[in-house]
Image (cartoon, rainbow, N blue to C red):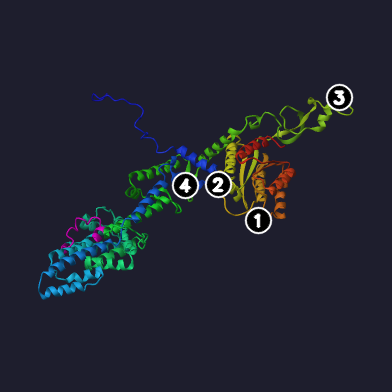
Amino acid sequence: MTGGNRFRYGSWRGGPDPLAPPYDVRAAVDSVGAEVLAGGSLRDALRNLLRRGPEDRGGLDDLLARARRLRREALRRGDLDGAVTRSRALLDQALAAERDELRGRDDDEARFNEAVLDNLPSSTARAVEELSGYQWASDEARATYQQILDGLRRDVLEQRFSGLRDAMRDAADPAVQRQMAEMLGDLNDLLARHDRGEDTTDAFAEFMRRHGDLFPEKPENVDELVDALARRAAAGERLMRSLSPNQREELARMMESALGPELADQMARLSANLRSLRPDLAWDRRERVRGDQPLGYGEAAGALGEIADLDDLLDQLGQEHPGATLDDIDVESVQRNLGRDAADDVRRLRELERELRRQGWVSRGSDGLTLSPKALRRLGGTALRRIFAELQTGRRGEHDLRSAGAAGEVTGASRPWEYGDEQPLDVVRTVARAVRRGGAGVPVTLAVEDFEVVETERRASAAVALCVDLSFSMISEGRWGPMKQTALALAHLIATRFPQDSLQIIGFGREAMPLSQQELAGVEPDLVQGTNLQHALKLAGQHLRRHPGSEPVVLVVTDGEPTAHLDPETGGGVFNWPPLRETIEATVAEVDQLTRYGTTMNLFMLGEDPGLRRFVDAVARRCGGRVFTPELEDLGQYVVSDYLRARRGRR
């Protein structure tokens, strides 16, 4: 109770929570993860998050579409030659009024003036020039002619200086023109000194004291003053470039007539100074603006300035240049061209990106945004949950530590067999127990209680090498997504449930390379042909030997037989199709080395390539491993289940 007023507090019911974050950050991360797990590029997934916008609203693509539409409308705004067209109409009006006045006079001077009018050049600009000293008989004609010069002078100066509208009301006043010439002279001197690298702090302050009322932008330094003027000047230059040569000449001569020699010279100096200070602006670009409505000089230059602004905005919103960030987008330009709601969308996207970085989901490097380890853990957890949702529950999925000696090095001892044991039988001791129980003689009858298994020293950890095929056929056949999902799920499983295990993901194309989770999520296929399983197995062996006390496990996911191997001399990948004998021999040699090391090696064959089928069957027989041919949607289940079985011991 305050001052007799009663307040009641409750949940907000006036629409979306005004204090809530603009977007669900976790949902944004999950949408990126879903695209990556479906086989998409990590770089494209993060880019698409900003392009489409979270929840498919307010993204850069929407803003780009609006900017493109406005640009198309600006290109249809009207006829750029409107300044000359309007001048021609005013000139015809003035000449008609003058001829009417001359026809009412009966003297030699009137006849002479009629002859002058009859012999005017067809060019509007040259006709206006020749009439500069003409003594008009008609007051109406004189005023109409003066409109041509005053209107064009006012349009040009107002286009270049947005604060001159009031000052140029009496553009024909010589005092006003002297004031403008003085301001332009001071401005050019200031810009020339700035271009030479001189300290212009005091000179700028003095300039603004004398002429600051003509610059409503209120620039605080010379650079801001240049920014305010250069875009307008560049728009005027683009207008001239966008006209035909004849139109350009006509407009240039008319502008010179309208401005007079002194103002025209100062305007030319100003354009040169601004071009030198801002060479990055599109001074010489031409545009094909079309339309039925004739545009005056200011309108035409304004349309081209708007098109240039939209071009810059399209570049910023496109985010195509290297190192592009949302901070590159000029929010004020977005608001000026696309409206307040568009600027709010950009601010929300910036806030989303900042929040993603602040909460540790993404980081920004020289290549742009990338997922952080925290986000990759969430991504791997999502992949693993998908796989476990399909797995049947049971003992094979448990991390069973109860049965001592279930896997590892042979100790020389044996023990009675128990239900569920997977260790090899101790044949000699099994038969000996049967003989002692039943006596000598043949045949020897075995009973359940006679069986003994070899006892081993338990290995509590496994060293796992997951070799994944990165050849182009994996993505062309839609196998890229399941492969990534499988590898990320296995990495998450080992990191969270079996942290004592050591996983190395190895990707192989024409050559092989170890991959971190982050590199795996971001890896993209290339068009280089080659399936270098030999190099992958070589790297797998190096990983296993770094962990001599762990159960060695190699899992291979591929959709093609080996077509590349490392050249012994150069160390580079050698590709050939059909596979060379040297390629097969080099690959089998690595298989044999892993087999001698006691490695459990299983192969997951994707597709129905006959050559691959023959190869993997031969390898499995040679190393005692197994071959799986899962459907794509079952790949993760097969690999994870096989890892859980393999880490409990050799088979």
Contact flag, marks 4 and 3 (Cβ < 8 Å) = no
Callout 2, which amino acid? Answer: Glu
Q: Is residue 118 left or right of residue 579?
A: left
**Amino acid on which the number 1 mark rests in the picture:** Phe
Res. 161 image quadrant: bottom left
- For marks 2 and 1, the one nearer the N-term is 2
Distance CA(mark 2)–CA(mark 3): 63 Å
Residue at numbered disc 1: 575
Spatial CA span between label 3 and label 1: 63 Å
Foreground label between 3 and 1: 1
Tell me which amino acid carries mark 3: Gly
Figure quadrant of residue 340: top left
Residue in the foreground of this view, choosing between 431 and 144: 144
Task: Report, in whole angstroms, how far the alpha carbon at label 4 lies from the one at label 1.
Answer: 34 Å
Give SS at disc 2: helix
Counting from the top left corner in percent of width and height, residue 461 is at 65, 36
Q: Position of residue 341 (x, y in %)?
A: 34, 43
Q: Which residues are magenta?
A: 155-175
Find residue 75 and report its image quarter: bottom left
Determine whether label 2 and label 1 are within 8 Å by CB: no
